[in-house]
Image: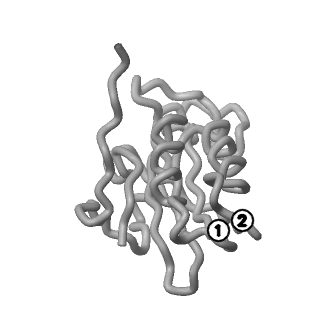
Amino acid sequence: MGEREPEIGFDQAYVEPVGQTSAMDSRHWGNESGNHSGHNEVGEPSDSSDSNRPSRPSQVRKHIVVTGMVQGVGFRYESVRTARRIGIVGWVRNCMDGSVELEIQGEPELVSQMIEWLWHGPQWARVDDVTVESEVPRSPAHAERTFLVVR
């Protein structure tokens, strides 16, 4: 039997701090194994003095606003389920103007899958627009560990 994903209680949602990224967040980091690509920041081979510089991250981070009939239709709950199934991290919340706001982070292909899903959302939603802006990916130490609802 497969594992069942825990129920998400919106009234008990963990609130992740949201705000400006620090200077440390804007730095590039190497992969988990510590290997480096041997290329400079624009992808060209680096000289030996640059060989200790970390490679570009394999993660992207996007700030997204979804408009339409997207509140009161299970959009946040289904966003959490979909993001966790896909394997990305971040957060989702309702906005006072009736839109839904998200920040998502993960491998570019996985983030693209989530954005594609956001264009239709759950069956009861009507999505009018999805606005996507790139953000600086957070380092593994500063990124969310899962996908969650914030207020």
Badge 1 marks a residue whose secondary structure is: strand
Furthest-left residue in this view: 12
Using the image, determine if residue 30 lies above or below residue 34. below
User: Where the C terminus falls, by quadrant?
Assistant: bottom left
Q: Residue at x 37, y 18 (%)?
A: 2
Q: Residue at x 32, y 68 (%)?
A: 17
Q: Is residue 29 left or right of residue 142?
A: right
Read off the residue under disc 2: 127
Q: Residue at x 51, y 44 (%)?
A: 83
- Residue 44 occupies quadrant: top right
Q: State how the image is colored.
A: one colour
Q: Position of residue 70 (x, y in %)?
A: 60, 68
The residue under label 1 is which amino acid type? Val
User: Where the N terminus falls, by quadrant?
Assistant: top left
Lower sequence index among marks 2 and 1: 1
Mark 2 closeness class: few <14, some 14–19, many ≥20 residues within 10 Å: some
Closest to the camera, between mark 2 and mark 1, is: 2
Badge 2 marks a residue whose secondary structure is: strand
Q: Position of residue 104 (x, y in %)?
A: 53, 54
**Label 2–label 1 contact, CB within 8 A:** yes
Q: Position of residue 33 (x, y in %)?
A: 40, 23
Circle on res. 101: none
Q: Is residue 82 left or right of residue 41?
A: left
Read off the residue under disc 1: 66
Viewer-side residue, 131 vs 23 = 131
